[in-house]
Image: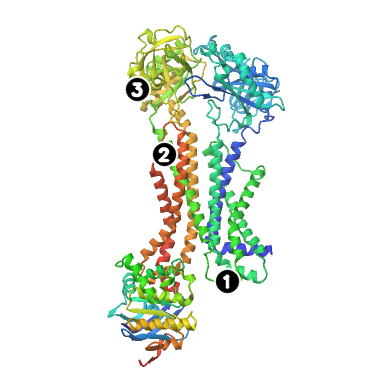
């Protein structure tokens, strides 16, 4: 699914040059659930932005689903992104002015082939699946953090992506809600969605098949959990 | 404490340059408009207030109600009326007549055309215009006295002391009420010098004589006639008398002294035919009841209210910019507020601080506004055609008013943001986020209001411009191009004028020459009483004396019958001796035919009564709107009377104007050597008709531009702010596949909503206003939906252009910056 070869990312300003990622090699297979860990500033976010096609690498190759996407145009990346990748953020990133249903529909809004009716249906189904359907008409500010994150996950899956990128999805949640979110992600993974998750939590990392540890922009260890 | 507030305020202004610029520039432009408008309003309302001791002074205005004719409201009075009031009403302590006539003044070898006003000998005691030299009680009592203004004295005598100097004035030698005479010169002695009249008086006078002077040209006939309205009358009431009570006594007086049957040939009660108003001297200028004959075009209270309203709206638009941006940016200040509260500031103290900042901003804007106003003042004066000045010391009341307005504007713009900001709870404020949501619905309302004002004004301006253009280009039923007119009233004998006309015809550049009793756009009116045989009721029509060439010179169209011809004796008429015209022929226009109850075709061959004489209608001409597009065509009769007509009109070939005019002047000197020529092109008087409208249109245009500019400034700032506030939302949308184009459209659409709502409000309001305004024109444009759509679309496009840069910048930003650390 994902194959990174000698991937590097350097941020340049007029005065400083910061290496965020260096010579990174990583393969994530289809249907895999990978967790990325590491201290603040180790390059996790950069890694996720590049994998999510929100940022371009400065060197190396990025193979996504069999295509080397380095050098793809902005609009081609946008096409690929919206059809293949779903995002879940630590701070949920729901739009305050839209209600729950509309927030989920947003992920289909820019799909020209999805009619308005179908968009409504699919968003409703995704919310049901995340057991938050009864809150469809509420505004995000009326929901608890756990509920908001379930909405965000509904939004991430509604376009049926092959890959879900989760950026500390439990970072803003209490233990119970965190566990629940992890259950949902595991369930999605069991249904065949590839998941790459950045997390600070060792216990939540245990849900993944594989844990990748980053330090100073490079992979230091990889541990593979035995699938029972 | 104050020092700290001031420091923070100034640093805020300096740090947030765009924000400060928008607030200060918007307010400054708005205040500059207010200053310019206030100066104009002050100038208009100050008219005649400077005249000493004018509280008990009134102008006598006569209105006429004649059968079959709309009321004629004039600002003038017949000659005997003011004396009648003084002789019979004890409250009237003084009166003067004021009849101006164009004359020719000769000093040495130089001749000057000069309006000379004939007044009563005690004029300067009734209207106390300041004299530089001479005694107001006696300055006009001698039969050869003349009083000159300083300007006129300088014109005639240079820098020499004019007192006691002599000059010659032309005077007709004809005894009776005729329009043609030869002229001789009468010697007058300068007995007084009047301080130049400033622009802000409704009176125009540079040379005054008594009507008892040897140089008077008013005939005894006109001094006795009650229906000859060719000058003004003023009365002074005794202190403490009630003008309304005095006016109430006038109708009885009129019934006792005026015999309408004898004067007009109609059996009417005088108080039914004539109404007299006493208009306070200082309010004459702003009396815009459509009266005829003003010396200075009158101002209009409605226009002043309208301008005041526009100034207020523009200022409000600028204030709302401040309110909008300040509430939108509330969170920028949140930390400061929280800290101040933590160290013990009360809400009241914070309120004071933020209101103070708003007022400080407004005062800075005032400094700029004053500079802008000073720079624009000369151009503004040229535009208004009068000197406009602003003196900080002498105009302290106006300055105080402007400062008060400025402070009020500051408080108004600052009050809402101050309330919001001072309400922040420190704990929440320190936790960041939440920013900019405070007052967001109020912001939308204010933006809607701003664009409502801008769009409404734009629609009105477009319609006003179109109407003026329409009125100017509309066919009035006659040609006005390349027509030169010369007044000859009592300046030449009839024989001399006829020879003069024959002489003019010899020049190849002069295509045709006609003589008539009146010319278009003169505003004057001669009434004729018409009747259908066997019908008792009178129809009042406009009597136009002409020669048969008149219709050719003016390019008028014959609709039915034939025109008049000098070759037929029965086609000529003696207009001044109404009896004895039986069997003569006349022409009428379509409006007159309609008033008689005929179609044009039916009217031809009909016999009607002109006074006591039976005359026949032989032809009907198409209506000519000789008063311009505002007034409908007058029902008119045309009488062929070469001898009593006194205006010479000629059509000049376009390429030969300078040559033909030189020829006209030379010929004039041969036939009237003692008198200066009084000539003008008809188009010039036409342009004067629309001068006020054009100014109004131009003013509207400028203010619309200002209002739109200020509204857009605010929108620009709001867009900048909103765009930055929405980077997170935009980022999310981008992550989920939105293209830059989608996002730009989204932002443009959201900013379009208030503009669209503004359209929905502005359209009906503008429509109602314009419907009423256009009713003032007899012929006017239709209110096409195009004006509304165009103004709305223009506002939308301008709004788009304003925010496009922000929208594109935000939409193109990389979403990871918006989403990274929340």
Residue A29 occupies quadrant: bottom left
Please name whichever residue, B386 or B815, is drawn nearer the observer in this view of the structure: B815
**Residue A132's spot in the image, x, y percent?**
42, 74
Please check whether the numbered discs 1 and 2 fall on a single chain. Answer: yes
Most extreme residue toward the right is B239
Residue corresponding to mark 2: B466
Query: In the rendered structure, are the residues bearing label 3 and label 2 in contact, judged by CB atoms less than 8 Å apart?
Result: no
Most extreme residue toward the top is B580
B652 relative to A193, above or below? above
Given the image, what chain letter belongs to the residue carrying mark 2? Answer: B
Q: Secondary structure at mark 3?
A: loop
Q: Residue at x 42, y 37 (%)?
A: B467
B13 relative to B628, above or below? below
- Mark on residue A164? none
Q: Counting residues from the N terminus, which is met first, the one under dot 3 or under dot 2? A: 2
Residue corresponding to mark 3: B557
Please name whichever residue, A12 or B164, is drawn nearer the observer in this view of the structure: A12
A15 relative to B131, above or below? below
Separation of residues labelled 3 and 2 (CA atoms): 27 Å
Q: Residue at x 49, y 42 (%)?
A: B700
Q: Counting residues from the N terminus, which is met first, the one under dot 3 or under dot 1? A: 1
Q: Residues within 10 Å of mark 1 (few under 14, many from 20)?
A: few
Separation of residues labelled 3 and 1 (CA atoms): 83 Å
Given the image, what chain letter belongs to the residue carrying mark 3? Answer: B
Residue corresponding to mark 1: B428
Q: Counting residues from the N terminus, which is met first, the one under dot 1 or under dot 2? A: 1
**Residue B369's spot in the image, x, y percent?**
57, 50
């Amino acid at each position: 699914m994902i194959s990174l070869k000698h991937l590097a990312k350097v941020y340049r300003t007029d005065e400083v040059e910061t290496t965020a990622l260096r010579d990174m090699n990583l393969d994530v297979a289809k249907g895999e659930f990978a967790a990325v860990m590491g201290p603040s500033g180790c390059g996790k976010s950069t890694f996720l932005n590049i994998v999510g096609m929100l940022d371009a690498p400065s060197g190396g190759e990025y193979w996504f689903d069999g295509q080397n996407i380095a050098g793809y145009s902005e609009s081609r990346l946008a096409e690929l992104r919206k059809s293949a990748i779903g995002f879940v953020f630590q701070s949920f990133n729901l739009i305050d002015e839209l209600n729950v249903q509309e927030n989920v529909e947003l992920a289909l809004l820019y799909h020209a082939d999805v009619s308005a009716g179908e968009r409504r249906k699919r968003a409703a189904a995704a919310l049901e699946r995340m057991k938050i359907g009864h809150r469809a008409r509420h505004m995000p500010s009326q929901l608890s953090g756990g509920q908001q994150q379930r909405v965000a996950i509904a939004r991430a899956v509604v376009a049926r992506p092959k890959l879900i990128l989760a950026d500390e999805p439990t970072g803003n949640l209490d233990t119970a809600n965190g566990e629940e979110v992890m259950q949902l992600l595991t369930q999605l993974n069991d249904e065949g969605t590839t998941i790459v998750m950045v997390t600070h939590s060792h216990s939540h990392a245990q849900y993944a098949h594989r844990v990748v540890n980053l330090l100073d922009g490079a992979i230091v260890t990889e541990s593979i959990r035995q699938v029972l | 404490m104050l020092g700290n507030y001031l420091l923070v305020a100034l640093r805020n202004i300096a740090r947030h340059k765009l924000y400060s610029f928008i607030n200060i520039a918007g307010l400054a432009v708005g205040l500059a408009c207010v200053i310019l408008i206030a100066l104009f309003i002050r100038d208009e309302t100050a008219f005649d207030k400077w005249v000493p001791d004018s509280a008990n002074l009134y102008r006598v205005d006569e209105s006429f109600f004649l059968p079959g004719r709309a009321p004629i409201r004039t600002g003038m009075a017949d000659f005997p009326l003011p004396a009648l009031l003084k002789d019979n009403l004890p409250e009237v302590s003084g009166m003067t007549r004021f009849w101006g006539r164009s004359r020719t003044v000769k000093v040495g070898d130089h001749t000057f055309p000069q309006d000379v006003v004939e007044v009563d000998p005690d004029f300067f005691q009734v209207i106390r215009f300041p004299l530089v030299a001479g005694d107001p009680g006696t300055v006009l009592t001698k039969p050869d006295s003349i009083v000159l203004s300083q300007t006129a004295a300088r014109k005639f005598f240079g820098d020499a002391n004019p007192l006691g100097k002599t000059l010659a004035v032309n005077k007709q030698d004809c005894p009776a009420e005729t329009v043609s005479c030869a002229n001789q010169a009468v010697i007058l002695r300068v007995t007084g010098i009047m301080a130049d009249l400033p622009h802000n008086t409704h009176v125009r006078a540079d040379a005054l004589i008594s009507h008892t002077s040897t140089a008077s040209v008013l005939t005894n006939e006109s001094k006795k006639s009650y229906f000859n309205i060719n000058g003004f009358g003023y009365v002074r009431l005794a202190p403490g008398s009630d003008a309304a009570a005095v006016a109430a006594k006038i109708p009885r007086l009129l019934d006792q002294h005026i015999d309408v049957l004898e004067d007009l040939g109609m059996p009417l009660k005088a108080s039914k035919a004539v109404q007299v108003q006493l208009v306070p001297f200082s309010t004459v200028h702003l009396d815009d009841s459509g009266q005829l004959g003003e010396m200075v075009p009158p101002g209009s209270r409605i226009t002043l209210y309208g301008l005041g309203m526009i100034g207020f709206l523009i200022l409000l638009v600028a204030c709302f910019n401040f309110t909008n941006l300040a509430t939108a940016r509330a969170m920028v200040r949140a930390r400061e507020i929280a800290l101040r509260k933590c160290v013990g500031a009360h809400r009241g103290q914070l309120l004071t601080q933020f209101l103070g900042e708003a007022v400080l901003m407004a005062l800075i804007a005032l400094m700029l506004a004053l500079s802008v106003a000073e720079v624009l003042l000369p151009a503004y004066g040229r535009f208004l055609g009068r000197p406009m000045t602003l003196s900080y010391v002498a105009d302290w009341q106006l300055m105080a008013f402007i400062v008060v307005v400025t402070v009020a504007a500051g408080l108004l713009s600052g009050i809402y943001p101050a309330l919001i900001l001072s309400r922040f709870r420190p704990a929440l404020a320190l936790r960041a986020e939440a920013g900019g949501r405070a007052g967001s619905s109020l912001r939308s309302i204010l933006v809607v209001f701003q664009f409502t004002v801008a769009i409404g004004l734009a629609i009105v301006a477009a319609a006003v411009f179109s109407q003026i253009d329409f009125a100017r280009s509309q066919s009035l039923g006659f040609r006005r191009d390349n027509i030169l007119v010369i007044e000859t009233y009592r300046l030449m004998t009839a024989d001399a004028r006829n020879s003069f006309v024959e002489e003019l015809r010899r020049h190849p550049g002069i295509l045709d020459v006609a003589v008539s009793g009146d010319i278009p756009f003169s505003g004057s009116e001669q009434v004729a009483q018409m009747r259908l045989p066997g019908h008792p009721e009178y129809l009042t029509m406009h009597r136009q004396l002409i020669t048969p060439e008149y219709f050719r010179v003016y390019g008028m169209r014959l609709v039915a019958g034939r025109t008049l011809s000098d070759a037929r004796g029965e086609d000529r008429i003696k207009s001044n001796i109404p009896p004895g015209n039986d069997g003569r022929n006349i022409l009428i226009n379509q409006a007159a035919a309609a008033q008689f109850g005929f179609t044009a075709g039916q009217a031809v061959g009909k016999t009607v009564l002109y006074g006591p004489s039976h005359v026949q209608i032989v032809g009907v001409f198409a209506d000519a709107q000789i008063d311009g597009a505002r007034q409908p065509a007058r029902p008119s009769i045309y009488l062929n009377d070469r001898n009593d007509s006194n205006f010479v009109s000629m059509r000049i070939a376009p390429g030969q104007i300078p040559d033909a005019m030189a020829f006209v002047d030379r010929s004039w000197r041969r036939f009237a050597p003692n008198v200066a020529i009084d000539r003008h092109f008809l188009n010039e008087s036409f342009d004067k008709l629309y001068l006020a409208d054009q100014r109004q249109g131009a003013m509207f245009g400028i203010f619309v531009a200002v209002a739109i500019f200020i509204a857009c400034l605010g929108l620009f700032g709001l867009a900048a702010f909103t765009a930055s506030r929405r980077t997170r939302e935009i980022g999310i949308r981008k992550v989920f596949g939105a293209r830059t184009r989608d996002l730009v459209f989204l932002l443009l659409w959201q900013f379009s909503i208030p503009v669209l709502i503004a359209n929905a409000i502005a359209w009906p309001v503008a429509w109602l206003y314009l419907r009423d305004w256009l009713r003032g024109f007899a012929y006017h444009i239709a209110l096409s939906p195009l004006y509304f759509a165009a103004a709305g679309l223009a506002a939308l496009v301008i709004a788009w252009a304003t925010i496009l840069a922000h929208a594109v910048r935000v939409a193109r930003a990389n979403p990871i910056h918006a989403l990274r650390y929340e």
